[in-house]
Image (cartoon, grey):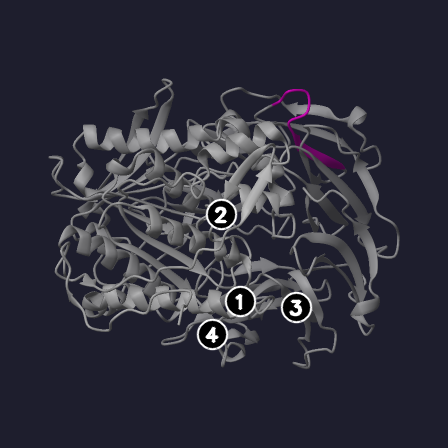
């Protein structure tokens, strides 16, 4: 009987590639003729039927059967690495301090923190009143809540101003569709107010009985409405206080640090609009701060008796800081505080009674700049390393001289600092403890610059263990993202030590499409310039080979989501450069996804990729879309991962891509698809379970290198 795949033997024999890879007969997906016709262009898609899923049509069972067959095939091929994977998991887990606690955050009279226990996957969310010596209140025992669930995430912890009610969101499917619950902290009761299909966080008004939240379209998962809920009422009858008509915009609702204002933000890639409300008058209508303007982004911070506005208005590509009175918010009333600079990207601002702190990016690195409000005197916080990641921590208190920030580097574990803005003294509050004797001095970091084909200098951050030889024979894993203006900073990973300790170097390519080198860096890697992202990554790989950090037979690449698109593009464009590639939840069927507005996030991202209904955008997307450009040629060894419940990149993109690669590629290299049938885009929710995926990835790389323990 004909099936969606060819059943394969359960008897294996030694692979021709590596002793621990086992040979088995790979699944072969059915082909069903489907033609896409647009802009006088006719394209055959033999695997379009894989869009039929979750019991929605006649092929849904066959889709699931195919995914399970691919999983069985992966298990067969990787069966010789099972013990190695288990050992890697134990090794990485052993570096994690199981009984631990976050640095407490003081807010409105209470210290809030979370703590973990030995053997537990999740955590307890707790607080103490007034002093760290006070009695502990366990607000949520997530370990207990998650019992019986294969996936469980709690988000959006928000306590009412009277400190008596806790709002939180729960997702137990991994589709990022949260139900908001309310807990009476004094009695321990979970109220009957359960608000479904939300983004997961509630924004309390000052009356302690009203909150605002973002509701989602149940099909597209777009955030469409801001609703108002009053405790004790039917959530189905909640008032809609704002509805976004532009499907390319994301919306959210939040509260100012001083608790006086509630903001609704609507933002697309190129424009934004904010509405605001006196938090003590939740039934009043929201006012528009200033109407949306074409190609103008702005965000708002409350500072005493005025608003601060970070904006790119008037060609301020890297953003500038402006201000206006609380009662005159139209753009005509904005006055410049900090001018636009072509060499400095203004990323954000943190406000305090006597200081503001600017989060800036200079030469690809974060700079935190403190500015006194009494005399406008400025100084930078010195981090002392050539490559690192730094950002604001949680700073809910307004009347304080202490800034909390986070810091890490490729060799420095995640660290939390309290910085006195008046005295310039910093105090290390906590550093991630790496069990097993980690010594940062045993590792070396470098910040290098590759040169793109068009002459652009591309930053590369690199780490390896001392003794690493630059003779072109060492293995190296190159990682990148390169989309949405998201900057990739060099941070620490305790699990990565398992890679470095076995002779690998690890590198991050800070390619265009991110925002490391300013807003232009992003604009030069999106829409009709998207291919710069791919060629930049290839140029970084070639640079590392040329400088003998590795050789082509030892160079590996990894990326996820939009970084998975990057992986798909570079193996089409330069397949001979990589020995192996890991593509995690990859966005690889660009044209078809961007044509389907029922798929989550499609309409939000027209300003990122383009709208293929536009002829020029269609043919440009088609020219790089990984799925569209598979050819009959050799490809590197590939491990592809996805999740059945993925809300960001639907499972059928990598499934179609792998099926087509199987049919087209001319090599005998490994091609594996791992579909997690229980999780979504972010993988496992437990703090240890994700290491099983890391162990699989590393076992794949190590086996290709002939490293078996």
Q: Which residues are magenta?
A: 306-316
Q: Give the residue at mark 2.
A: 45
The dot on residue 179 is 3
Q: Nearer the viewer, residue 354 or 47?
A: 47
The dot on residue 60 is 1
* Element under disc 1: helix
Residue 189 sits above or below residue 440 on the image = below
Left or right of 68, for residue 620: right
Q: Residue at x 64, y 32 (%)?
A: 270
Q: CA distance from mark 2 to mark 3?
A: 38 Å
Q: Earlier in the sequence, mark 1 or mark 3?
A: 1
Q: CA distance from mark 4 to mark 3?
A: 17 Å
- Residue that protrudes farthest toward the top in the picture: 455
Q: Earlier in the sequence, mark 1 or mark 4?
A: 1
Q: Residue at x 39, y 34 (%)?
A: 510
Q: Earlier in the sequence, mark 2 or mark 3?
A: 2
Q: Residue at x 20, y 70 (%)?
A: 83
Q: Inspect the magenta stretch and tell me whether residue 445 lies in it.
A: no
| For discs 1 and 3, the disc positioned in front in the rendered view | 1
Q: Earlier in the sequence, mark 4 or mark 2?
A: 2
Q: Give the residue at mark 4.
A: 150
């Amino acid at each position: 009987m004909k099936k969606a795949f060819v059943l394969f033997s359960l008897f294996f024999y030694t692979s021709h590639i590596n002793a621990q890879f086992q040979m088995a007969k790979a699944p072969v997906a059915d082909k069903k003729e489907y033609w896409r016709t647009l802009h006088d262009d006719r394209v055959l898609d033999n695997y379009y039927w894989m869009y039929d899923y979750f019991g929605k049509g006649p092929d849904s069972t066959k889709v699931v059967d195919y995914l399970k067959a691919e999983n069985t095939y992966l298990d067969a091929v990787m069966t010789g690495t099972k013990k190695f994977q288990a050992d890697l998991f134990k090794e990485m887990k052993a570096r994690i301090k199981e009984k631990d606690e976050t640095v407490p955050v003081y807010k409105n009279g209470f210290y809030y923190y979370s703590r973990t226990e030995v053997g537990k996957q999740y955590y307890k969310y707790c607080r103490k009143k007034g002093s760290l010596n006070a009695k502990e209140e366990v607000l949520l025992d997530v370990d207990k809540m998650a019992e019986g669930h294969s996936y469980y995430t709690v988000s959006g912890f928000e306590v009412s101003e009277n400190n008596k009610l806790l709002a939180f969101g729960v997702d137990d499917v991994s589709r990022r569709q949260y139900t908001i619950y309310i807990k009476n902290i004094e009695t321990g009761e979970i109220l009957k107010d359960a608000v479904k299909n939300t983004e997961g966080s509630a924004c309390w008004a000052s009356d302690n009985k009203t909150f605002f939240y973002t509701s989602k379209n149940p099909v597209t998962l777009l955030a469409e409405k801001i609703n108002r809920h009053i405790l004790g009422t039917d959530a189905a009858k909640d008032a809609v206080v704002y509805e976004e008509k532009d499907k390319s915009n994301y919306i959210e609702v939040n509260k100012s640090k001083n608790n006086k204002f509630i903001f609704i933000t609507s933002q697309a890639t190129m424009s934004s609009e904010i509405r605001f409300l006196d938090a003590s008058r939740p039934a009043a209508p929201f006012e528009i701060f200033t109407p949306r303007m074409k190609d103008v982004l702005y965000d708002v911070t409350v500072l005493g008796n005025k608003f601060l506005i970070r904006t790119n208005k008037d060609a301020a590509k890297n953003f500038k800081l402006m201000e206006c009175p609380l009662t005159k918010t139209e753009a005509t009333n904005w006055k410049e505080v900090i001018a636009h600079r072509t060499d400095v990207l203004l990323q954000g601002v943190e406000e305090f009674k006597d200081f503001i702190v600017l989060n800036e990016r200079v030469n690809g690195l974060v700079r935190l700049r403190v500015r006194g409000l009494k005399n406008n005197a400025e100084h930078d916080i010195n981090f002392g390393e050539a490559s690192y990641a730094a950002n604001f921590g949680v700073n809910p208190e307004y009347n304080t001289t202490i800034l909390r920030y986070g810091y890490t580097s490729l060799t420095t574990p995640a660290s939390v600092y309290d910085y006195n803005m008046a005295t310039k003294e910093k105090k290390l509050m906590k550093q991630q403890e790496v069990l097993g004797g980690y010594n940062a001095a045993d590792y070396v970091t470098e910040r290098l610059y590759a040169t793109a084909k068009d002459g652009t200098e591309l930053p590369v951050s690199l780490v390896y263990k001392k003794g690493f030889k630059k003779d072109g024979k060492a293995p190296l894993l190159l990682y990148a993202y390169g989309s949405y203006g998201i900057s990739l900073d060099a941070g620490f990973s305790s699990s990565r030590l398992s890679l470095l300790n076995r002779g690998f170097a690890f590198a991050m390519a800070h390619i265009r499409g991110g925002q490391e080198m300013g807003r232009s860096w992003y604009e030069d890697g999106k829409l009709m310039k998207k291919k710069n992202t791919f060629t930049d990554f290839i140029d970084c790989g070639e640079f590392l080979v040329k400088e003998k950090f590795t050789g082509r037979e030892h160079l590996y690449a990894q990326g996820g989501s939009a970084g998975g698109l990057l992986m798909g593009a570079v193996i089409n464009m330069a397949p001979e450069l990589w020995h192996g590639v890991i593509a995690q939840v990859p966005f690889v069927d660009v044209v078809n996804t961007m044509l389907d507005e029922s798929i989550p996030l499609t309409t939000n991202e027209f300003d990122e990729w383009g709208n293929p209904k536009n002829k020029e955008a269609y043919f440009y997307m088609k020219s790089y879309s990984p799925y569209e450009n598979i050819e009959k040629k050799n490809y590197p060894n590939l491990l592809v991962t996805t999740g059945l419940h993925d809300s960001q990149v639907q499972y059928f993109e990598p499934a179609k891509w792998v099926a087509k690669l199987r049919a087209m590629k001319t090599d005998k290299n490994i091609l594996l698809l791992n579909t997690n049938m229980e999780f979504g885009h972010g993988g496992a929710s437990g703090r240890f379970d994700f290491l099983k995926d890391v162990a699989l990835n590393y076992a794949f790389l190590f086996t290709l290198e002939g490293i078996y323990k």
